[in-house]
Amino acid sequence: MFDQSPYRCRVEWGKRGAREAAERGDILIIVDVLSFSSTVITALNYGAIIYPYPPYLDGKNYAKKVGAEYILGRREATEMGKPTLSPVSFQKEHAKKKYVLSSLNGAFCTWIASEVPALLIGSLLNAASVASTANQISCITKANITVVPCGEQWSDGRENEDSLRPAMEDYLGAGAILSNLEGSKSPEAEVCMAAFQNSEGKLEDWIWDCGSGRELREKGFEADVRHCCRLNVYQTVPILQKDHFVAAEGNV
């Protein structure tokens, strides 16, 4: 059986990894660099309130129930001048406003793994801060920590194929966070951390030109890619509180 149990810090991919980590009672750090995690971090940095919601349920109806605005697709929202899954669409004017944010990867993983000691959102933008918060919570709860790079979904998956598309940017984001976590690390976590450490100084170039980066750029969202590949520019750490994210306090 696949198992990283002897180690305090682990890394698991996607929805399956999030579910299994939640069943173990681990602290989870969800990493979806392009762009769910980066969007949530940026939105909370500006004071917005984000409700994660899976894409297969009726997000618009849910938004009405919680008194929030349902975030539209990137293209539609951009044309209407509204915030979207694009992190750079959030600004100071969105402070204290509620938004329901769905995504195939980050929001879905969050939904699956919501019943845990703590669920945090991490990316390159807040790698050091989210690791510090996880370290504090782990010290209090004695729970292990699993970092979950979400990956992407193949758009043309065929019958009996795994739909998960591992994403380089999520792996590097996970490695940046693991580099700041305290305690023993599984071999899987060590390799992930080493990948990040080998990429320092190359992050912007590599993410700009990786498959996910090119995919976004070709759709006209170059600013998102530039924004999301920056390292440790925010101290904001989103933590799930029942059904929405709040910014973790400095002392957990």
Image: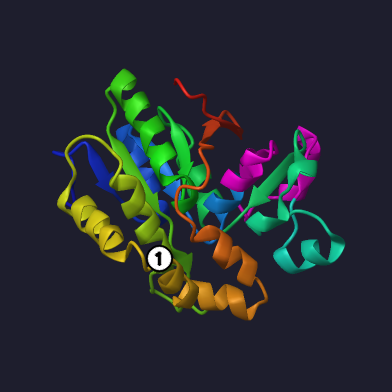
81 to the left or right of 195 = right
List the single residue furthest toward the front.
Answer: 201
Image location (x, y in percent) of residue 206: 41, 72
Image location (x, y in percent) of residue 22: 37, 38
Image location (x, y in percent) of residue 4: 18, 45
List the single residue furthest toward the right.
Answer: 80
- Quadrant assignment for the C terminus: top left
Q: Residue at x 49, y 61 (%)?
A: 229
Dot 1: few (<14), some (14–19), or many (≥20) neighbours within 10 Å? many
Q: Residue at x 30, y 42 (%)?
A: 180
Residue 51 is inside the magenta segment: yes
Span of residues in magenta: 41-70
Residue 197 is inside the magenta segment: no
Q: Residue at x 51, y 47 (%)?
A: 233
Examine the rendered structure and indicate whether residue 213 appears above or below residue 45.
below
Disc 1 residue type (three-letter) = Leu
